[in-house]
Amino acid sequence: MSKHLYTQSQIEELENNPYVLRASGRSITYHPDFKIKAVMEYESGKSPSQIFIDHGFNLLLIGREQPRKIIHRWRKTITKHGGFGLKIERRGKGSTGRPSSSELSVEEKLKKAEA
């Protein structure tokens, strides 16, 4: 999640872009087809910044370094999960979170209580 906070007018500007599914004060959800298209354009030699500019994004709004970071993350996702990995929402998937107390062994519960 970004440290940047978007204003309501910036959120509206982002949501007017056809390649954005939704935007909030802290995040932008890009259309899956745009993600795949952007990675393909990058692999054909186009720079991340130019890809975002060509698709109507204001780099002053999203951040000059964001396109590079975003495309890098999307490429890692394609490597790990294939193109389908960009089409599904994966945030929160596979996270085990904190173990609940009921899953702890008796020894672990005792150590936790002593701490």
Image (cartoon, rainbow, N blue to C red):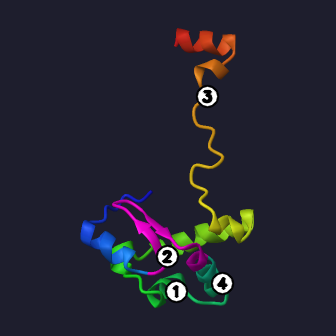
What kind of residue is marked 1? Ile
Q: Which residue is mark 1?
A: 51
State the residue at coordinates (31%, 61%).
5
Could you tell me how far apart the alpha carbons at marks 4 and 3 are, in whole angstroms? 40 Å
Could you tell me how far apart the alpha carbons at marks 4 and 2 are, in whole angstroms? 14 Å
What is the number of the mark on residue 99? 3
What kind of residue is marked 2? Pro
Mark closer to the chain start, 4 or 1: 4
Residue 24: percent from left, percent from top: 37, 62
What is the number of the mark on residue 68? none
> Do the CB atoms of the residues marked 2 and 1 lie less than 8 Å apart?
yes
What kind of residue is marked 4? Met
Q: What crowding class fits label 1: few (fewer than 14 Cα within 10 Å), some (14-19), or many (20 or more)?
A: some
State the residue at coordinates (61%, 83%).
37
Q: Foreground residue, 13 or 47?
A: 13
> Is residue 9 shown above or below 106?
below
Could you tell me how far apart the alpha carbons at marks 2 and 1 are, in whole angstroms? 8 Å
Q: Foreground residue, 38 or 111?
A: 38
Which quadrant is the N terminus positioned in?
bottom left
What kind of residue is marked 3? Pro
Q: Quadrant of residue 111?
A: top right
Mark closer to the chain start, 3 or 2: 2
What is the number of the mark on residue 40? 4
**Is disc 4 placed on a helix, strand or loop?**
helix
State the residue at coordinates (52%, 75%).
68
Residue 99: percent from left, percent from top: 61, 28
Q: What crowding class fits label 4: few (fewer than 14 Cα within 10 Å), some (14-19), or many (20 or more)?
A: few
Q: Which residue is mark 2?
A: 67
Residue extent of the magenta highlight: 18-35
Mark closer to the chain start, 2 or 1: 1
**Is disc 1 placed on a helix, strand or loop?**
helix
Could you tell me how far apart the alpha carbons at marks 4 and 1 are, in whole angstroms? 10 Å
